[in-house]
Every structure is written in C-alpha cells, then in structure tokens.
Amino acid sequence: MPTQRISWLSLLWLSSVFLLLAVTSLPAAPIKVGLVTDVGRVNDRSFNQSAWEGVELAKSNLGLGDRDIKYIETQDAKDYADNLAQFIEAEYQVIVTVGFALGDATVKAAKENPDTLFIGVDQFQGETLPNLAGLIFHEDQSGFLAGVLAAGMTKSGTIAAVLGTDLIPPVVAFNEGYIAGAKSVNPKIKVISTYHPGEISQAFVDPEWGAATAKQAMDQGADVIFGAGGLTGNGALQEVASQKGMYCIGVDADQWFTVPAAHPCLISSAMKLITPAVADLIGQAQAGTFEGGNVFGAAGLAPFHDFDGAVPQPLKNLLKAAKAGLDSGIIKTGYGN
Amino acid sequence: MAQANSNKPNVTQKQFFLGVFLIPFLALLTALAAGAVVMLAFGDDPILAYQGLFQGAFGSGRAWSVTIRKMIPFILTGLSVAVAFKAGLFNIGASGQFVMGSVCSVAIGIHFEGLPMIIHLPLAILSGMLGGMIWGAIPGLLKVTTGAHEVIVTIMMNYLASLFAGWTVYAGGTQGQTPGPLWDRTARAISETPDVFDSAQIPWLFGPPYRVHYGVFLALIAVVVVWWLIYKTTIGFEIRTVGQNPKAARYAGIRVEKTVVLTMGLAGALAGLAGTIEALGLNHKFAPEFGGQVGFDGITVALLGQTHPFGVVIASFLIGALDAGAAKMQFESGVAADIIQVIQALVLAFVAAPLIIKALFRLRSSDDEKHATKLNTSWGGS
C-alpha cells in the first residue's frame, strides 16, 4: 500500500517538476521577493508591517514591478514551512520571514534550498549559513534609552512597562534594558514591569489586558509607561493617552505614525529600524553582496514629535551620551552577558 | 439523523447519505458563494482566489499532503466534540486536552533514550492520550459530583492547560528564574522542549517535503473504533441514551454519572491523541505556539459532520482543504487569508441551521422536524 502511493505521488511530483522546468526556461526576470508573516496580518502596525514596508522600499529602490513582491499571512504556527514552500516552489530569489518564531523553519528551508536567499527578521543565527541573514537588534540598548527617557520624564518616581510574553527573548531584552536605563538615571526609581501571562498566541493580541495593566500601573503611581508587545502594548498606549498628564513610550516602529490614538501621551518609541534594514539586505541580494549570519540593524529612539519642547535639553544630552556609550560598548545594559 | 439511523432501522440509506455526506458539501458550496460575494464587495477577484484555493489544497502532491496533514487533528478533535455531543455534553475543552496530550507525549518522548521504537512510541502515545483523558474526565467528574456545568469548567481547564504547558517549557533563565522541567537547556532563551528521540517520532509516510506521517492511520483507526463503540456496543447505547434523555436513561437502569465521566474521558483521550500526533508526528517537540486552536475548530468539524464519526472525516477533509489552500489563495490572488475563516464561520452557520440549506436546495425528507431539532437535543439534553 505505501509503495503504491509513493509511486503515484512521485509521478505527480515528476510531472509538476517538468511543468516548472517548462516555466523557468523563459527569459530571466528581475528578482522576486516573497515575505511570510508571523501569525497575524501584514498591516499589524508592528513587525510584519515594518518588514513588508522594507520589501516595498526595496521594490522602489530596485525598480521591481508590483508582481515581483508578494506576501503570505501565516494563519497557524504549524504552517511556516508550507508557506515558505509556496515561494520556493514559485522560484522566488529572496524570501523574508518575519519574527522569532519562524527561525527554525527558515533555517531548515535555507539548508534545503542553498540557491535561495533568506532574510530572517528578529532571528538570531547560532550557525552561519551563507544564504541566510538573521536581522537582529540590540533591543536591550533600545530599551535602555527608553528607560533613560522615562526616568528623566517621571515626576512620581514610578514608571512602568506593559509587555508581551517573557517566552520571547527580545521582549525580555527590552524590559531588562528599560530597567537598567531607568536605574542608571535614578537608582531608587520604582519600575512596575508586567508580562502578559498567556501563551504566545494571545500575548501580543490582547489590547484589553494591555489597557487594564496600564491602568493598574497608573493607579500605583506610575506616570510614564512603556508599552512593548504588539497590539497588547498598543492597548496600553491608548489607555495612557486617555489619562491626563501621563507619558507613554512605544516600541518597534515609530508609533507616532502607527498608533495615532496615542498622540496625547507618546513621547517617543524604542525602535528597531526594520524597514531600512530589510530594504538594504534585499538590495545586497540584488547586487550579489549578500552575506549570511547575524546582521545587526539600527536600534534607537524615535523623534519626540509634539513633545520635543517638553523634553528638557539636559535629558536630550543625556540620551545622546547614552546612545554613544551603548554604541561604543562603554555602557553595558547587563542583559545577556 | 445519524443516530436515528442506528436506532430506527426504517430510516433509509438515502437519508443517511443526505445527512452525513450531502449537507456538509452543500453548506460549503453556499459558504463559498457567500464568500465570493464578500470578495466582490471588497473589489477582489473570487475566481482567481478560488483557483488558488483549489490549487493550494489539491493542485500538487505537496498540496494534497498539506490537506491530509491538516485533516488529522481535525478528525480527532472533531470526534472528541462529537462523542461528547452524543451524551448531551458540550466539550469546549478539546483545546486544553489537545495541549495536555502534546505535553504528556513529549514528556515521554524526550526521555528514555535507547528504548526501542516498538516500546517508546506506543508509550509516548498512551501517555498523551492519558493526559488528555484525565483533563477531559475532570470536568465530567465535577459535573456529576457538584453539578458544575461542563462548558464553564472545560473553558477554564483550557486556560489551566495552556498555562501549565507554558510553565513546563519556560526558559526563565534570562531572568534568573527556575526553568520548566521540560525546557530544552540548549535552547538558550527559547521556551521549548528538546526534540523527541527518533524512537518516539511517528515516522513520515513519504518524508519531506511531503509532511504527512503515519498518524493519519491512527486517526482513521480512531474513527472506526469510535463508530463501533457508539453504535455497536452497550456503552455506546448508554452514551446515546443519556444524551437523548438522561431521566429515561436513569429509569432504564443506566448509571448516568458513570456514563458522563466515561464520555468526557473518552472525548479527552481523543483530543489528547490529536495533540500527541501533532507533537510526535509533525512538530517533534512542544512549544507554546503549538497551541490548541485546533481544539476549537473541532466544534466546527463535529457540527459540520453532523456529529457522526464518518461525517467528521468528511468535515475534516473540507475544513482541512480550506486551511491548506488559504496560503496559495493569498499568494495567487492577494485576497487576505482571513476570508477562509469567514467562509468556515459561514459553513458553521449554514450547518447549524440545516433547514436553510434544505430550503435553499429544496431537499425533502420525511422527518425534517427531527433533523432540525436534533443538534439542539444532543447538546442541551441534560
């Protein structure tokens, strides 16, 4: 029974291979770039969106056509490999996978398809594969700057962080950096950090919990709140925005643009500059200078926007010094080493 | 009608066919048509989308392999919910039972290196089924001892299961906290178990890229066993009697309490087996993101399959194909894969209201009324 099935399937497989060969003997097209999201939408105002905007930026940089870039939104964590396979079968030259959770599937696909280039956003590479670049960020440094800012802006001496799950290392890094940064300004500062208690599938899509936790922190005296965790963090930002005299700090992207509802409180965001980094890597793929291994993207604070006047000049100088210190390695955040 | 079929020999083959096979297909067709209207309203091309959907589900060997892989857990969680329905119980806890099955099977699979597969694999599978069974039996036990409604208790048990599972693999090291007992020490900050040993993995049928494993046969065996148990044994008769009328069952000398606990245990074991097969056959480990959503989908599958074991297979095939084709659909047409969830919800709506389907397609049968009320009696019966 199994052997019969195998021969039947292999016939099907062979015929589809021939079909593919017939298609690929057409003249060479410009590079095609595919993107597989983590569970969630491509317009999530967070990771998926920043990465996709990077692909779109690369499209205009390299003069690709609309049909040369495509994305698949993952519905279930078990489908990562199959969604990757869609692009591999369609002979895409560059495949971007978004998020830490796709790391395993991306490494496997990269090993099985040495001629395809992979960009793993937020995926640390334990071993270097020539065709897989893991785009990672020093979240702890970005969080450190947010902590310095928060400690400089608080009047009550209590600040808070509302976070996605501690099952995801980058979230922990943001928090540890945030605490270290705050303590570097004021060793006695009180930091109320709360991780979402649920499983990964809920931790980043629970704005109600984020709002309730932010409210709780404000009841306990916090007046600057760092919201780091997808929609959960956005819920916290919006809750803070509804209270007078409170500040909030966003995460990942410049949330001034992604969460307009947070304008009343959003002094800055602890950013990972995913968009330009993804576009750069795709550009390198086109130019043939692509290298595998870990690639560090820029991390830093977003502009203060409307709060530029509210942030005192000494604090701005302090932030500049902290950024320089982190970049040169003089300042350590204490995370991961 | 499925259960009427076995009780009353005067119900014809035709009606059985109508209920178990035809209605799911018609419900799907109607839902697809409604989905096309939604796509048109958003300016998308439904023909392109459905071509992609079909290719993604059946267009190649790999597409078939995804459809079949998706079917496996749907069959088992669908059976889990269906079996509980038969006894008038609404098992919302398949999700938690699925997670417990995954954790308990992996706990055996990552230990006992060197055991031969013939011992290790069955041991891991039994452990997973046992984990699910206990998780299912507890709400049954609470129902008969305290009167706590199984819907509430199973929902709470889902949260308990997901938190417990998260704890077992909790990395914690980066914060100086105690890691979970099943955590992979080489995974650094990642919360997951190590891979289970080869001797506890359900082997691939064909091997990658076709990610189909022998678990598909376990699922089909479970279908036959459940069908036999429900329709051909005394226990099955008792389960169905309790579902139709618990008072009459008591008068007839059936121990309703025992039957309720037994049914919930059986339902839990089936959902646990689903989690076991996914863990040992597909993921080869447990991580929190392999959660129990498929347990909730089991409710859709059971209803679409008219709570009949064979109907569940048909329903799993249809729902699995929809899921399998979603990515290709988005790839080909740009239509958001979310539309698949809209279609699945519509399928459920049409099945829960079988009269709509019958009216739409002018199907007639002698006992329309009974068909329409059957699902109600089978979950609200107690």
Image: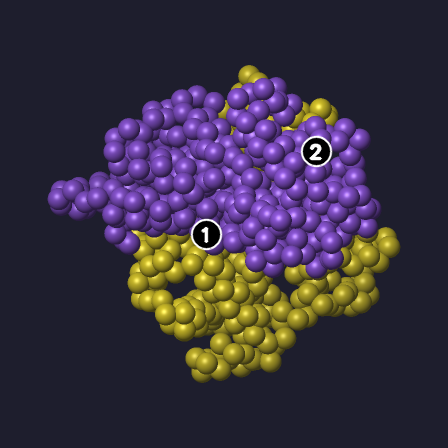
**Residue at point 46% right, 40% down?**
A274
Q: How far across and how far down the image is residue B315, in percent?
A: 49, 59
Q: Which residue is mark 1?
A: A42
Q: Residue furthest front?
A: A313
Q: Chain of mark 1?
A: A
Q: How far across and how far down the image is residue A88, in percent?
A: 31, 40
**Residue at point 55% right, 20% down?**
A329
Question: Which one is in front, B240 or A203?
Answer: A203
Q: Chain drawn yellow, letter? A: B
Which image quadrant for residue A162?
top right
Question: Which one is in front, A230 or B111?
Answer: A230
Type of amino acid under label 2: Ala
Colour in which chain A is drawn: purple
The answer to whether one can see residue B66 in this image is no
Q: Which residue is mark 2?
A: A182
Q: How far across and how far down the image is residue B46, in percent?
A: 35, 67
The answer to whether one can see residue B23 in this image is yes
Name the quadrant of the C terminus of chain A: top right
Q: CA distance from mark 2 to mark 1?
A: 33 Å
Q: Are marks 2 and 1 on the same chain?
A: yes
